[in-house]
Amino acid sequence: MIQSPSNIIAATTPYLAAGRRMRRTPFTSRVEALGCRVFSVYNHMLLPEVFRGDEADYHHLKTHVQVWDVGCERQVELIGRDAARLAQLMTCRDISKCRTGQCLYVPLVDEKGGMINDPILIRLAEDRFWLSIADSDVLLWAKGLAAGMKLDVTCAEPDVWPLAVQGPKAEDLCAKVLGEEVRAITFFHFAEIEWRGHRFIVARSGWSKQGGFEIYVNDWHLGGALWDELMRQGQAFNVGPGAPHNTERIEGGLLSYGNDFTNANNPFEIGLEKYVHLDRPIEFLGRAALERINAKGIARRMMGLFIDAKALPACDSPWPVWAGSTKAGELTSCSISPMFGKGIGYAMLERGVWEEGTKLTLETPDGARHAATVTPLPFWRP
Amino acid sequence: MIQSPSNIIAATTPYLAAGRRMRRTPFTSRVEALGCRVFSVYNHMLLPEVFRGDEADYHHLKTHVQVWDVGCERQVELIGRDAARLAQLMTCRDISKCRTGQCLYVPLVDEKGGMINDPILIRLAEDRFWLSIADSDVLLWAKGLAAGMKLDVTCAEPDVWPLAVQGPKAEDLCAKVLGEEVRAITFFHFAEIEWRGHRFIVARSGWSKQGGFEIYVNDWHLGGALWDELMRQGQAFNVGPGAPHNTERIEGGLLSYGNDFTNANNPFEIGLEKYVHLDRPIEFLGRAALERINAKGIARRMMGLFIDAKALPACDSPWPVWAGSTKAGELTSCSISPMFGKGIGYAMLERGVWEEGTKLTLETPDGARHAATVTPLPFWRP
């Protein structure tokens, strides 16, 4: 049993009320049994956040292997003659060369070029896709477009619950539990793997930079048994439960919808320009808007900040960043990085102050001011 | 300062992680200062849940007046030549007679007749509406339909933050703070009210059966000051902070999207047939589907249950309801009602066991079995 971490629970830490509206996943009972006490809500579903304490979770993830309950990464399934067309309409990235068996990171944009979500697109067949989504109701967006355009496509939420296995020993654990063939799965590709007579999609992917897999458990009732077997067979690898880790993902440059960007941002502002394929003959909803934005140039841009701080509160609102006495932008996420021995964070910065090396000041809600230096993203590349 | 309630915090109650993804409202700092420790997440935003303890909050709401931070009731604004057409396309309720100044409860349904949300429609002008939504991203649904159909309408989230004033003394408090003219606002109508030189929409509405108003604060930065003035001027009425109350709303028959129904339910199943206007010449998306369902009849129906219990856990998953040894359906919400001195709840019941007076058995996750009796909704009408 892992004890709830005293180092992240303050006297004022809020409790989470219970209700069906914040759905449990097939793995929730397992993480509760292991002592998880801290959750967030993601796609109307519980996301466990901390097991051993913030820093211990970080080192465990980077050293061993963790099993993550990311059942909240809901799947939006598109099936039908127009499935590929709808998928392309939603993203500025060219998906025409995405083959069955492949995964693509696809920024979704609306008609104004504003971000809707940044899911992984999984091509299951010529006419069948899953979008493995971040925290917004992409199903409603897809259904609205499909209904409005009378497309021949069914959009639905399938009985699929991702379980992530992440960390340097993830491949060994997955090979042991799911078979040696997982070793042949290359990055952002998937294979259908048999486990106890069931067949799961297993992709080499996951929201960390430590390597690993996402297992798309396609039956609610199998979730607990698979979790238990991963824990049992993983003893030799020092397996443990875990969760997407804020420090590790910031170090690696991973973005979080709702934290780092919202519908008010376009993909250029958040460093996703390489996925904006305006030079390809693809039809997508925000094309005209992104062409205008591209021609005009952006007025703000997300950059990294190194922050002179030994401790920082959790960023739960847009903290101001100053260039002298002028507002330079807003912090979107931050953490203290054991790798760098100081604070790191993302900030949406105004034109003129986003160049590498610019000296800024971060103001935290307690009134403290921290010197900060602009740096390109990611902070670290494996 | 209100103390966090020991009677709803168990040793295993989870904590809520912090992050910008779970947005604060303009009133969050106020409820924190008043000692609120229990929140849920609603429309990606913090919703305070408990102040004095569950039963003390209930009695206070029914006796005095509470101010509720319901900033999480996001507004979806529809503006443009096709705004009324889009609003009608989304709901099975005839909105053609809804005048400016009026509010309507509108079940939103998709092309299959499945519920998308159950917001309040607020007609601000001929070509301008707000949908004051429950917990799903209606903005994406509206934008998807509008983009797909190339409608002449802008769908956006305005800078508007509802603050509810609920309870028997709500009118006196609102009259004192906002002016005597609020007394003339009739149920489910609104007026534009001036406060300190700003003009707010104030509607006689709210998610309780105790009467009161919802103030649509149209500037983030005014929220705190209005909260403070309501608290200050409300001393004579024994004002206090509060929140939508699970027991009170179940007694009154109010439904909660995500708890009591989801996209898997149609409006007939959840007792909303009076808002399904198939006899009117209106064009809405789920019309053909609801006509088929109406002709065929439904296979399950939400009903009330009186439950023989002195205490019940919080319902956070679909608890089975049995008719003898046959599964009769699932509980969706429950509470112990001080008014009835026993458990009350909603259950989605199969055809054949939904008649009033049917004797059933509720099974809770701890393995306990409670005798239950089917009853029509609502349990209580003011």
Image (tube, coloured by chain):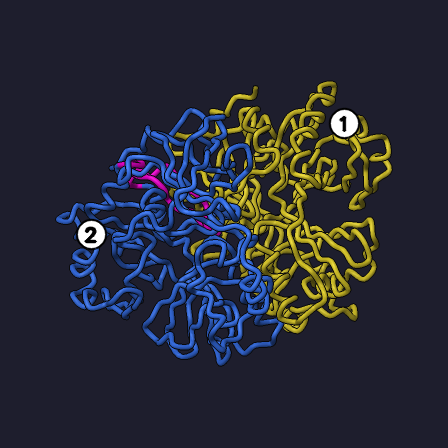
Chain colours: A yellow, B blue
Chain at tag 1:
A
List the residue tagged with mark 1.
A173
Query: Which quadrant of the structure image shows residue B369?
Result: top left
Where does the image place residue B229, in percent across and percent down from the top left? 21, 54
Query: In the rendered structure, are the residues bearing label 1 and label 2 in contact, judged by CB atoms less than 8 Å apart?
Result: no
Which numbered disc covers residue B169?
none
> For mark 1, does the 10 Å Cα neighbourhood hold few (<14), some (14 to 19), or many (20 or more) residues?
many
- Pointer 2: what residue? B168
Q: Is residue B250 visible?
A: yes
Q: Position of residue B16 (x, y in %)?
A: 46, 37
Q: To which chain does the residue with label 2 belong? A: B
Mark 2 residue crowding within 10 angstroms, few (<14) / some (14–19) / many (20+): many
Which element carries disc 1, helix, strand or loop? helix
Q: Is residue A158 magenta?
A: no
**Closest to the observer, A371 or A268:** A268
Residue A106 or residue B115, whichever sits in front = B115
The residues tagged by marks 1 and 2 sit, at their Cα atoms, a distance apart of 61 Å
In magenta, the rendered stretch is B33-55
Q: Is residue B54 magenta?
A: yes
What's the residue at 45%, 61% (across, down)? Answer: B273
Q: Is residue A168 left or right of residue A265?
A: right
The amino acid pointed to by label 2 is Pro
Give the residue drawn at x 27%, y 67%.
Answer: B198
Figure check: B177 above or below B64? below
Identity, as a three-letter code, of the amino acid under mark 1: Leu
Secondary structure, mark 2, is loop
Q: Residue at x 38, y 54 (%)?
A: B71
Q: From what the image shows, is residue A207 above or below residue B26?
A: above
Q: Quadrant of the N terminus of chain B?
A: top left
Quarter of the view holding residue A62: top right
Residue found at the far left of this picture: B236
Q: Looking at the image, is mark 1 or mark 2 nearer the viewer?
A: 2
